[in-house]
Image (cartoon, grey):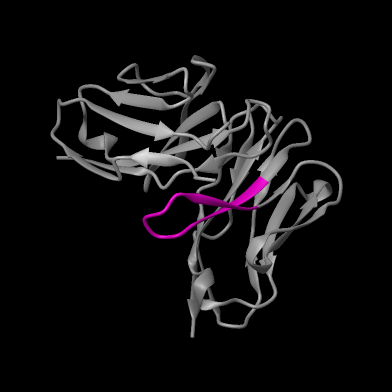
Amino acid sequence: KAGVTQTPRYLIKTRGQQVTLSCSPISGHRSVSWYQQTPGQGLQFLFEYFSETQRNKGNFPGRFSGRQFSNSRSEMNVSTLELGDSALYLCASSGSPLAEEAFFGQGTRLTVV
Amino acid sequence: AQSVTQLGSHVSVSEGALVLLRCNYSSSVPPYLFWYVQYPNQGLQLLLKYTTGATLVKGINGFEAEFKKSETSFHLTKPSAHMSDAAEYFCAVKKSSGDKLTFGTGTRLAVRP
């Protein structure tokens, strides 16, 4: 059974640009969450999607957005990139929002220059 | 709001020595508790979890953790460290199965030959 797949693994963008990251959950999983990991702030929750609906949202500016498709794949978008957006973005999938544990992908390393 | 405190951002042990990584939580209700491990340039891998039932939880790679409600702790231990255990370890909490994960700041474990 394939794990959580995040693409791309590495990305370099310029300030002011926008970026889209993709996450394919484990087959059969319908809940996808996104986390940002930085040396200064650690792991912070961005948002969670289930059945194409956002269930929960962390404390991030509106430049950060996401969506989920009918096949449970999810994308997150960051517009007007800032240097501080450089981070490892992790996606986690669960069978459902009530599942006890989440399974993480390898992440997308975003560098903003 | 829940929070997690991991004492010691860096821990160094000799190969074969006991590993003890500390985690204390604050939660208004009995929480769900997790330990994740992260190897360089990788995502998070679940080591073990506590939800209900037995307070001593065994995980993968010889790790275990004990939930102590009176001390609000969930410390991670391994009797004998191996070089391959060198990684960053994160304690996480959520107040219910449907809640988001709140992570501690992580403890980087180094294992000396």
Left or right of residue A110: residue B65: right
Residue A76 lies in magenta, yes or no? no
Point out the residue furthest to the right here.
B53
The picture places residue A33, in percent across and down from the top left corner, at: 50, 30
Q: What residue do we see at 54% from left, 52% from top?
A: B45
**Does residue B34 show up?**
yes
User: In which quadrant of the rendered view does residue B85 lie?
Assistant: bottom right
Left or right of residue A93: residue A5: left
Q: Nearer the viewer, residue A15 or B44?
A: B44
The picture places residue B102, in percent across and down from the top left corner, at: 57, 37
Left or right of residue B69: residue A78: left
Left or right of residue A53: residue B49: right
Q: Compared to A104, does A50 lie above or below?
A: above
The picture places residue A111, in percent across and down from the top left corner, at: 22, 42
**Does residue A89 show up?**
no
What is the magenta range?
B34-47
Q: Nearer the viewer, residue B78 or A48?
A: A48
Q: What residue do we see at 36% from left, 55% from top?
A: B41
The picture places residue A68, in percent across and down from the top left corner, at: 44, 20
Residue B38 lies in magenta, yes or no? yes
Q: Compared to A27, does B61 lie above or below?
A: below
Task: Look at the magenta stretch and give its main secondary structure.
Answer: strand
- For the C terminus of chain A, the quadrant is top left
Q: Compared to B111, does B109 lie above or below?
A: above
